Amino acid sequence: MLAIIGGSGLTSLATLEVSHRQALQTPWGEPSAALSFGRMGGRPLVFLARHGDEHGIPPHQVNYRANLWALSQSAPAGIVAVAAVGGIRPDLKPGDLVIPHQIIDYTWGRAATFHEWPQSAVTHIDFTEPYDHALRGRLLAAALAIGVTVSDSAVYAATQGPRLETAAEINRLEGDGADVVGMTGMPEAALARELGIPYAALNVVANHAAGRAVGGQAISIEAIHAVLAASMQQVRAIIERMLGDDD
Ligand code: HPA
């Protein structure tokens, strides 16, 4: 069974037939929402809304450890994390889909590991390749099969939020090699790796990153929501196709 973490614009999966919901308490506190178990296109799936069912939890206050631990309890074969991003790379425009292959973490002050003294021994996971190669391949193949264009590599910069970046910060991120910027990719990816769960991300470019829009206008949250609403149909279609390729 696959797990999906839905971000902004995907607080539910419209074509998921929910069979039951499970509200879990974890050693790390309460997840963002109850897990939704069900089927999509006949295939089993578990879904979690990263920001809560009502999208009330901002990126820096998401309990990533509780979310990942809760999902791990159903031993998913993999986690597909859907998240909105700003586009830094010039060819990326609102509405584009991206399957990132690398991460740079600029977040701070988040509970970012399950391995804390004195409960756990010192543990250093390998994170050279932060996303699971096979799961990325399945996402790419599903997109290709249904004729949805996705960018097959990108460096994801994880920022702290909840504010958007300054234009100078985006220039710095670009100088560091970042192609897209979002607020939720870390520590989510690292926690999945700590739990040994294959993890890949499907990013929706919601806006040009700060200072990158033609004319340099400010980023409009209304415009972001409109882009996300329009793109989620494609996100759902990719996931549905991916589930169909399961056997
Ligand atoms: N910056 C950070 N996170 C985001 C953005 C952005 O421009 N757009 C959507 N999530």
Image (cartoon, rainbow, N blue to C red):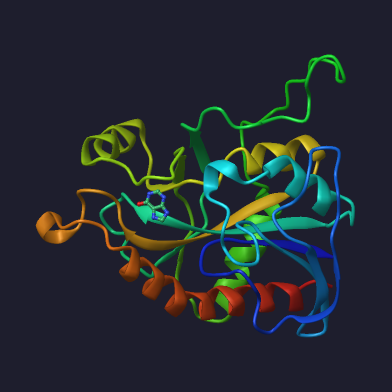
- 229 left or right of 200 in image: left
The residue lying at 29 percent from left, 51 percent from top is 209
- 141 left or right of 121 in image: left
- 25 left or right of 187 in image: right
Residue closer to the observer: 206 or 70: 70
The image shows residue 198 at horizontal and vertical percentages of 74, 49
The N terminus, quarter of image = bottom right
Residue closer to the observer: 43 or 227: 227
- 168 left or right of 71 in image: left
Q: Vertically, is 124 above or below 165?
A: above
The image shows residue 132 at horizontal and vertical percentages of 68, 48
The image shows residue 145 at horizontal and vertical percentages of 59, 78
The residue lying at 47 percent from left, 52 percent from top is 153
The C terminus, quarter of image = bottom right
Q: Vertically, is 180 above or below 175?
A: below
Where residue 159 sits, quadrant-wise, is: top left
Residue closer to the observer: 42 or 149: 42
The residue lying at 26 percent from left, 58 percent from top is 219
Where residue 241 sits, quadrant-wise, is: bottom right
Q: Evaluate whether residue 101 shows in this view.
A: no
